[in-house]
Structure formats: C-alpha cells, structure tokens
Amino acid sequence: DEKDAKTDAASSNTAEPPMSKSALKKARKLAEWEAGREDRKVKRKEKIKAQKEAKREAIQAAIAADPSYAEKYKAETQQKMEQKSSAVHVPVTVVFDCNFDDKMLDHERKSLASQLTRCYSDTRNSSMKPHLAVASFGGKLKERFEGILDNHHKNWKGFRFLEEDFVQVAEKAKEWMKEKNGQKLAGPLLERSQSAQAKAAGEGNEGKKVDGAAETEGEVIYLSSEGDETLHELKPHGVYIIGGLVDKNRHKGICHKRAVERGIRTAKLPIGDFLEMSSRKVLAVNHVNQIMLKWLECGDWGEAFLEVMPKRKGGQLRKESEDVED
C-alpha cells in the first residue's frame, strides 16, 4: 500500500497542470479551425472562380461601352506578361531573422506573418527578384503558418523557411546564389559590376577586383536603425538580414545587439541622407524589403524611399525640402 501511495504521489507530481480557460479556448478554436480546413479550401476555390467571372463580365461590359477598350486591355495584358517573363532572379538574399517569438504578443506575431506574406507578394511582382529566407522558423509563428494559414508558404517559390539561425542561413544563401537560376546580374547590380570592372581595367588591374570589393562582394549585413555603417548600395551575392520583430520598439537595439554578438556587420538604410522625416524611421519588415526591391530596379534610394515609405511618416526628399526653405 505504501508503495502504491508513493507511485500515486509521483504520478500526481509529474501530471501536467490543468489548462487555463484561455488555453482551453485557444485549443478549442484551433480544433474547430482544423475541422473546417476542407470547407475553407472549397470556399477559396469558389471565391477565386467568382472573382474571375466578375472580372470577365466587367471587361465585357467595358468593351460594350467602348469598343476601343479591347485593344487597350490586350496591350495592358501583353505588357504584364512581358514584365513577368522578363523578371530576373538576382544573386541577392534577404533573410528575415524570426528568433523573437518570445518578445511578441499574439497580435504582433499575426502582424509579422502578414508582413512576411506581403514580402513574398511584393517580390513575386518585382522585375528584380532576390532570394528570400526566414531564419529560426519555429514557435508560434510556425504554428500560425502551418495552422491558420494552411501551409500556403510551402508553395512560395524562391522563399525558404528554415529552422537554422540567421548566421547559418546566411552561409547557406552563399551557396544557393551560385545556382544557375539565381545568379544573373541585371539592373543596378549589373551597372555597378561593369563600372567596377572598367575602373579596374583603367588602372591596369583587368580581371582583378577593385580595392575594397573583396570585403563587400558577398557581404553579410544585418539591417538596423542603430547600424554602425550606412548602406549605400546592395552588392552582388550580398545577404541582407532584417529583424522579424513587431514590438512597437519595446526592445530597442535588440537586432543590432544580436548581430554584434555574432560578429555580423550592421548597417542602416540611408533614410536620413535622402529624406526629411516627420516621424521615427523604424519601418515594418515588408517596407524594408520593398525599399530594397525598388533599389534593385532603379538604383536610386530617394526614389525607393518616396515610393515605399508610408505617407503618414511625412517623407520628403532633402533636396526638395531645401529648395522650399530657400
């Protein structure tokens, strides 16, 4: 009897504590969500079908009202197809460091997942496509992508979701950027590469890298508003890390600290060099990615900032601001 009593006591000590009302509610919601997975799948297909039909009817109505719209629509469609077919996969990687699961609230994790989704969408529609990767993919963020978001991320081309940390993922990126479909130089990257080669040839160093190129070719930089350097351009085979943290700046400087501790260079975007801002310079994850996408297309930070920066932040080109003051 004494032995049984000890066994019962040991069992009670190792038994898991009862779930709180909040945890039970979340578990019940998750179970209901899982049970409705197939129904959602059917509804999504029906919604897409309805949207296509509505678009078709709208086009037909526009042509009926103005027959010349048919040619205009055909030209627009052709242009979109050409842009899509001419998109280039460039040897640049953007890594999202998502090892901040314990630093965010539930609604902030939800926001981060939405921002990562937007990053994929923006990159998919860009004419210059860098590689994308999530580092430290796990915790509740992973649960959200694999649960509520129905694993859609597994179908995202050019976007890797990896459990390794940002340093390990940066090393992997150096390898996948050497692959045939991910190493074509184009746009500003090609122009700067050709300029560097021309400079080397002019100095009698044809075939050799220009001074300083050895340190920046294939650079790995963690982007942070507290960065030790300013990022003036993106480099071929460069890896640029963005902190996947949505916290209303509660943990100020944490990304910079993580990078320094791991021996990774840090740099800030040159926002202050180009824009006069009426509010803080901390940007959402998708805005940072979008700014880099725009730079890869045009090579102009000022243009990239003006197009991407949220209007509420009141960004104005410094030159324009100075002209007004004069």
Image (cartoon, grey):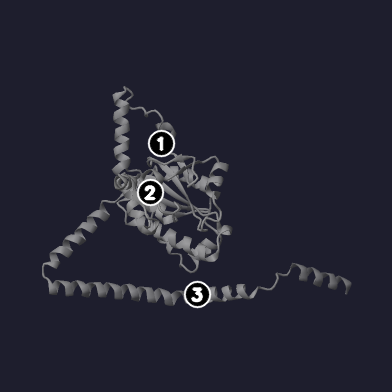
Residue at 34% in and 51% down: 316
Residue 274 on image: x %, y %? 36, 45
Q: Earlier in the sequence, mark 1 or mark 2?
A: 1
Residue 21 falls left or right of residue 14: left
Q: Could you tell me residue 63's position as x and y percent?
A: 14, 71
The answer to whether 140 is drawn above or below residue 239 in the figure is below
Mark 3: give few (<14), some (14-19) or many (20+) Cα within 10 Å.
some
* Residue 67, picture quadrant: bottom left
Give the amino acid at mark 1: Glu
Of 303 and 75, nearer the camera is 303
Who is closer to the viewer here, 62 or 33?
Answer: 62
Q: Which residue is mark 1?
A: 217
Q: Secondary structure at mark 1?
A: loop
Pair 2/3: label in front: 2
Q: Is residue 79 left or right of residue 251?
A: left
In three-dimensional space, the C-alpha distance between marks 1 and 2, rounded to whole angstroms, equals 31 Å
Residue 155 image position (x, y, % from top left): 40, 61
Which residue does the image show at 31% across and 22% down from the upper left? 204
Between discs 2 and 3, the one toward the N terminus: 3
Q: Earlier in the sequence, mark 1 or mark 3?
A: 3
Q: Tell me the element at label 3.
A: helix
For the point 19% across and 71% down, the residue is: 59
Quadrant assignment for the C terminus: top left
Q: Residue at x 25, y 54 (%)?
A: 83
Query: Looking at the image, is mark 1 or mark 2 nearer the viewer?
Result: 2
**How many numbered marks have been drawn onto this rendered protein structure?**
3
Q: Name the residue carrying label 3.
A: 33
